[in-house]
Image (cartoon, rainbow, N blue to C red):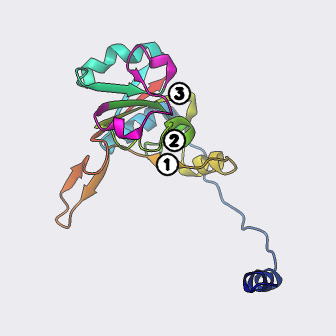
Amino acid sequence: MTTREKILKAVLENQPASTPPPEVFFFPQETGNLSDKFADTLISIGGRAIVVQGLDAIGPLLPKYFDTTRRIATNIPELAGTAGLISQDVDPHSFQDIEVMLMRAHFGIAENGAVWITEQLMGQRILPFIPQHLAVVISASDIVPTMQQAYQRIGSARYRFGSFIAGPSKTADIEQALVLGAHGPRTMTAFIVH
């Protein structure tokens, strides 16, 4: 028996007794319009929320909010006519000039204005973090009230990489000067699809 095997055997033989997990208290679910609460919260943290009636309504709105003379990319096939479609096989070094990245989010959280995105929807992990402006697309029916419900929703899911993203990137120095877009997208827009 190797030293490694001896150590692992000793660890296995000296496990503490199993105890049931603690009971989790869940706060009462919020009532009301979660889409409106999500939008209000996202706006309060520096983001933008735009309600649309379908994916086809997003394209005409882009010139109002973004510089469309620059590179706009998406990994949503339905928006290929609106923006350049990026496949998962593209060299990530080619993303350096993306002005706006349009991508789906699995769901949003009303209490903090965050969205949950995994690598499955990102395509490549760099895509939500490299553009100047991030635009996420979520369904109004996919907004949960609190982080407790968000963790319930992702608790048993299997994914390699995921991230909660709330608003544009922010940092503050010791003098409390808040800087938006210091180390990530300067803006975050959520297109809430009804």
- Magenta residues, start to end: 76-99
Q: Residue 139 carries which label?
A: 3
* Residue count near mark 2 (Cα–Cα under 10 Å), binned few <14, some 14–19, many ≥20: many
Q: How far apart are marks 1 and 3 (CA)?
A: 18 Å
Q: What element carries label 2?
A: strand
Q: Distance between the residues labelled 2 and 3?
A: 13 Å
Q: Which mark is residue 117?
A: 2
Q: Residue flagged by tag 2: what amino acid is it? A: Ile
Residue 40's image quarter?
Answer: top left
What residue appears at the point 42 percent right and 26 percent down from the top-left corner?
Answer: 74
Q: Residue flagged by tag 1: what amino acid is it? A: Ser
Return the residue nearer the eye: 1 or 47: 1
Q: What element carries label 3?
A: strand
Q: Which of marks 2 and 3 is nearer the N terminus?
A: 2
- Pinpoint residue 10: horizontal percent, then vertical percent: 79, 86
Q: Residue flagged by tag 3: what amino acid is it? A: Ser
- Give above or below for 53 relative to 187: above
